[in-house]
Image (tube, helix red, strand yellow):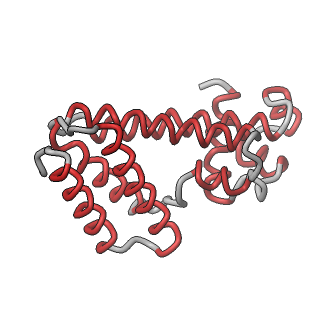
C-alpha cells in the first residue's frame, strides 16, 4: 500500500468516527503515522484528503454492497439490499453514512464533498435500478427510487435513534409491499 493510500485509509477512519471539520491536520498526520510535511506532500490541503477519503469510501461501500447482494437470486435482491443495510447499521463501527455526514458538514451544493455525496447516492440508485430490472419489476426506476428511500431512511433512523429490530422489519415489510405492487416475487 502506498503512503498516499495509507494516509487516505487512516483519514477516512478518523473522518467517519469524528467528522470532517472536527479532524485537524495534526491529528490526521498522527493517525496516519506520518509527519504533516509528508501528509501535505501527498495532499496539498485537507480538502484534497477529504475528497480522496470519500472516493475511497465510495469504492469500499459499493464493493461491499455488491458482494453482499450478488450471491442472492435476482428476484430476492431488493430485499437483500435492506438486509445489507440492516446488517451494516449493526456493525460496531457504524457512524451513519459518510456521504450523508459529508453533505451535512459541507452545506454548499458545489463543494467537492457535497458533489461526491450526490454522485455516490446516484451510483447507489443506479445499482438499485439494475437490481430492480433483474428482479423483473415492472417499473424498475420507480421501484429503485422507493427502495433507495427505504434504505436511506433506515440508515438515518439507525444513526439517530440507534439500531432497533423493528425498524429493519418495517423496512423489509415496505419492500415486500413494493415488490408485490411491482409484480415481482417477495423473498
If the image is split into quadrants, where does the N terminus sit?
top right
Give the quarter of the image for residue 6.
top right
Give the quarter of the image for residue 124.
top left
Q: Position of residue 27 (x, y in %)?
A: 79, 52
> Residue 33: in sight, yes or no?
no
Q: Position of residue 18 (x, y in %)?
A: 68, 60
Foreground of the two, 58 or 14:
58
Residue positioned most to the top: 2
Q: Position of residue 105 (x, y in %)?
A: 72, 55
Residue drawn at x 20%, y 58% as measured from the top left: 177
Residue positioned most to the right: 37
Above or below, 176 relative to 160: above
Residue drawn at x 53%, y 37% as measured from the top left: 58
Asked whether, in this view, residue 20 is left or right of residue 174, the answer is: right
Above or below, 150 relative to 168: above
Asked whether, in this view, residue 52 is left or right of residue 120, the answer is: right
Foreground of the two, 9 or 132:
132
> Residue 120: in sight, yes or no?
yes
Residue drawn at x 67%, y 33% as measured from the top left: 52
Asked whether, in this view, residue 27 is left or right of residue 154, the answer is: right
Residue drawn at x 46%, y 68% as measured from the top left: 157
Q: Position of residue 107 (x, y in %)?
A: 74, 53
Amino acid at each position: 500500500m502506498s503512503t498516499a493510500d495509507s494516509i487516505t485509509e487512516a483519514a477516512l477512519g478518523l473522518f467517519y468516527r469524528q467528522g470532517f471539520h472536527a479532524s485537524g491536520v495534526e491529528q490526521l498526520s498522527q493517525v496516519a503515522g506520518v509527519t504533516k510535511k509528508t501528509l501535505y506532500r501527498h495532499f496539498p490541503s485537507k480538502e484534497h484528503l477529504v475528497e480522496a477519503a470519500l472516493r475511497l469510501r465510495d469504492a469500499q461501500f459499493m464493493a461491499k454492497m455488491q458482494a453482499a447482494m450478488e450471491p442472492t437470486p435476482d428476484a430476492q435482491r431488493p430485499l437483500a439490499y435492506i438486509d445489507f443495510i440492516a446488517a451494516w447499521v449493526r456493525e460496531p463501527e457504524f457512524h451513519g453514512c459518510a456521504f450523508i455526514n459529508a453533505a451535512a458538514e459541507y452545506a454548499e451544493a458545489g463543494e467537492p464533498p457535497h458533489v461526491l455525496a450526490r454522485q455516490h447516492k446516484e451510483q447507489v440508485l443506479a445499482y438499485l435500478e439494475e437490481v430492480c430490472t433483474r428482479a423483473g419489476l415492472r417499473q424498475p426506476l420507480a421501484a429503485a427510487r422507493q427502495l433507495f428511500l427505504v434504505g436511506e431512511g433506515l440508515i438515518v433512523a439507525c444513526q439517530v435513534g440507534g439500531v432497533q429490530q423493528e425498524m429493519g422489519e418495517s423496512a423489509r415489510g415496505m419492500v415486500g409491499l413494493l415488490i408485490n405492487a411491482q409484480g415481482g416475487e417477495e423473498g
